[in-house]
Image (spheres, rainbow, N blue to C red):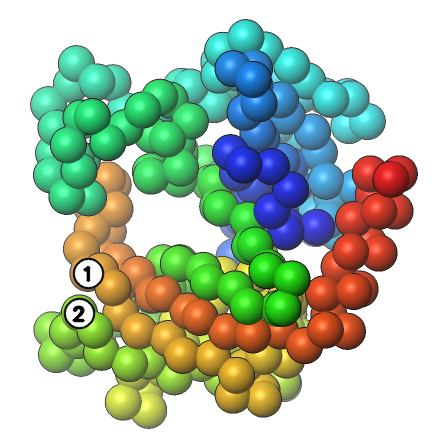
């Protein structure tokens, strides 16, 4: 599951370089100043069918890894604070150095994106007891549907439409993002399977909260979505969590 379980937690996602589909593969969290990493059981099986092996050096898929500092293979995905690009990154995200408390925060902000592979980090979705939730995400596939004129018209605060793409041959839970009726990309797949029914029922609102570039220079569009999942979904997630954790 990619539902939030810890206070400070991120989901490691692998993108299949052939199909461009994203698969959640692991959970990274920080607790009591210790870092932990564990592969996701069910999601990992789906990724393996698509060709995923493991993320080095985490070769034992049933183990919980622990470290007193951020694992080196994840820390290496972060920009060097001494480099000029780090200051540019803070400016791009409208942050001050004091806003970045530790390496975990920096990983959350940047997603740990590199030009040399297809891994990145996402924040897990968190549901309240009544089913309410809020997520922020960068529109996936924006560059494939990019229209310069349309992009320039988009303003902060503009409403976007979300629409379940029921006939998607790769992802039965795919959710499109549309602006003035035109498709501009997708909700990241790690969220779509949790919100597609919410979208179909129209129990949501979504708006543009940020336009810019990621730290690799690609144009981005960030959306905030607020919605409410029905109770049967919340109960199903709770049952799955108990099975996964054995509690």
Image coordinates for residue 137, horizontal then vertical, percent = 40, 58
Image coordinates for residue 2, horizontal then vertical, percent = 63, 50
Report whether 200 appears left or right of 244.
left
Instruction: Give the residue at mark 2.
Output: 156
Instruction: Give the residue at mark 1.
Output: 211
The residue at 52%/15% (across/down) is 33
> Compared to 169, does 12 lie above or below?
above
Q: Nearer the viewer, mark 2 or mark 1?
A: 2
Report whether 177 appears left or right of 189.
left
Which part of the image, by quadrant, shows the C terminus?
top right
The residue at 54%/36% (across/down) is 7
- Residue at disc 2, secondary structure: loop
> Compared to 235, does 29 lie above or below?
above
Image coordinates for residue 166, horizontal then vertical, percent = 63, 85
Task: In this rendered view, identify the residue nearer to me: 217 or 133.
Answer: 133
* Outermost front residue: 130
Q: CA distance from mark 2 to mark 1?
A: 7 Å
Q: Quadrant of residue 159?
A: bottom left
Give residue 11's mark: none
- Residue at disc 1, secondary structure: strand
Q: Quadrant of residue 9?
A: top right
> Compared to 88, does 202 lie above or below?
below
Q: Quadrant of residue 87?
A: top left
């Amino acid at each position: 599951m990619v539902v939030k379980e810890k206070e400070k937690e991120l989901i490691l996602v692998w993108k299949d370089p052939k199909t461009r589909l994203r698969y959640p593969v692991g959970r990274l969290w920080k607790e009591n100043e210790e870092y932990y990493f564990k592969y996701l059981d069910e999601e990992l099986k789906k990724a393996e069918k698509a060709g995923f092996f493991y993320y080095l050096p985490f070769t034992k898929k049933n183990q919980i890894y622990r470290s007193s500092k951020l694992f080196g293979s994840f820390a290496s995905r972060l920009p060097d604070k001494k480099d000029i690009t780090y200051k540019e990154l803070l400016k791009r995200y409208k942050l001050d150095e004091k806003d970045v408390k530790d390496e975990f925060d920096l990983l959350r902000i940047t997603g740990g994106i590199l030009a040399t592979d297809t891994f990145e980090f996402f924040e897990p979705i968190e549901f309240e007891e009544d089913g309410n939730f809020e997520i922020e995400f960068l529109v996936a596939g924006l560059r494939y549907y990019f229209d310069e004129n349309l992009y320039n018209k988009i303003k902060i605060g503009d409403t976007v439409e979300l629409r379940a793409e029921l006939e998607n041959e790769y992802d039965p839970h795919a959710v499109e993002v549309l602006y003035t009726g035109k498709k501009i990309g997708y909700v990241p797949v790690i969220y779509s399977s949790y919100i597609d029914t919410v979208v179909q029922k129209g129990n949501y609102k979504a708006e543009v909260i940020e336009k810019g570039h990621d730290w690799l220079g690609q144009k981005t569009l960030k959306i905030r979505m607020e919605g409410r999942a029905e109770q049967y979904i919340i109960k199903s997630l709770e049952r799955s969590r108990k099975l996964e954790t054995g509690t």
